[in-house]
Image: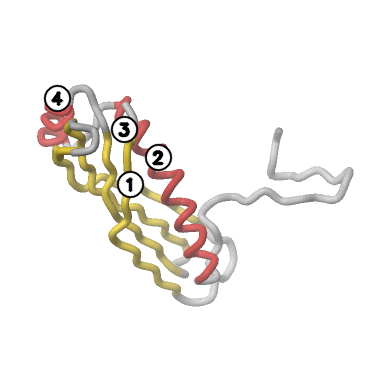
Amino acid sequence: MPVIGLTFNLMEAKRGGAPAGEIKVNSTPRIVTMKEVNVATLKKKALSLGFEFVTSYNPDIGQIKIGGELLYLADKNAAILKQWKKKKRLPEKVSVEVLNHLFRRCLLKIANIAEDLQLPPPLQMPRVRPAGQQSADYVG
């Protein structure tokens, strides 16, 4: 079933000291809450998943955190809610769809914030090379 909506309600960003040496970027999504909600326009119930998405830098030169709510339309809300309450985990199929959507939407938003703070982007950007010169870090 599809993700039918996503809203952001938290954006925190800070920049620390000047970078020295190699910088590692780590982006981590996390589902923090789940509840069932009515979607009046669809005349159905959906799952509302509260999330946090944090991009951190090592060494500690900054951190970007965004949070929000994702609406997911499922066939069996009760089973998913039961598993969430018991184990704080989503079924694999739901987890894959939700996490892929979060990575797509959140990394784009964080890339813009990182640029404003003059931090490295959380994604590897393509690089144009002169003709005949191969990139050592891309196999394609």
Residue 79, labelled with which disc? 4
Pointer 1 residue: 6
Please give the name of the residue rendered at 55% of the width and 62% of the height, measured from the top-left corner: 120
Q: Residues within 10 Å of mark 2 (few under 14, many from 20)?
A: some
Task: Give the mark nearest the N terminus, 4 or 3.
Answer: 4
Task: Inspect the image, locate mark 2, and give the three-letter code of the amino acid beneath it.
Answer: His
Where residue 95 is drawn, which disc sits there?
3
Looking at the picture, which amino acid does disc 1 mark? Leu
CA–CA distance between discs 2 and 4? 21 Å
Q: Earlier in the sequence, mark 3 or mark 2?
A: 3
Residue 125 coordinates in the image, percent (x, y): 63, 51
Marks 3 and 4: in contact by CB < 8 Å?
no
Name the quadrant of the N terminus. top left
- Considering every residue shown, the one lying at the far bottom of the view is 17
How far separated are the C-alphas under marks 4 and 1? 22 Å
Q: Which residue is mark 2?
A: 101
| Residue name at image x 53 percent, y 76 percent | 18
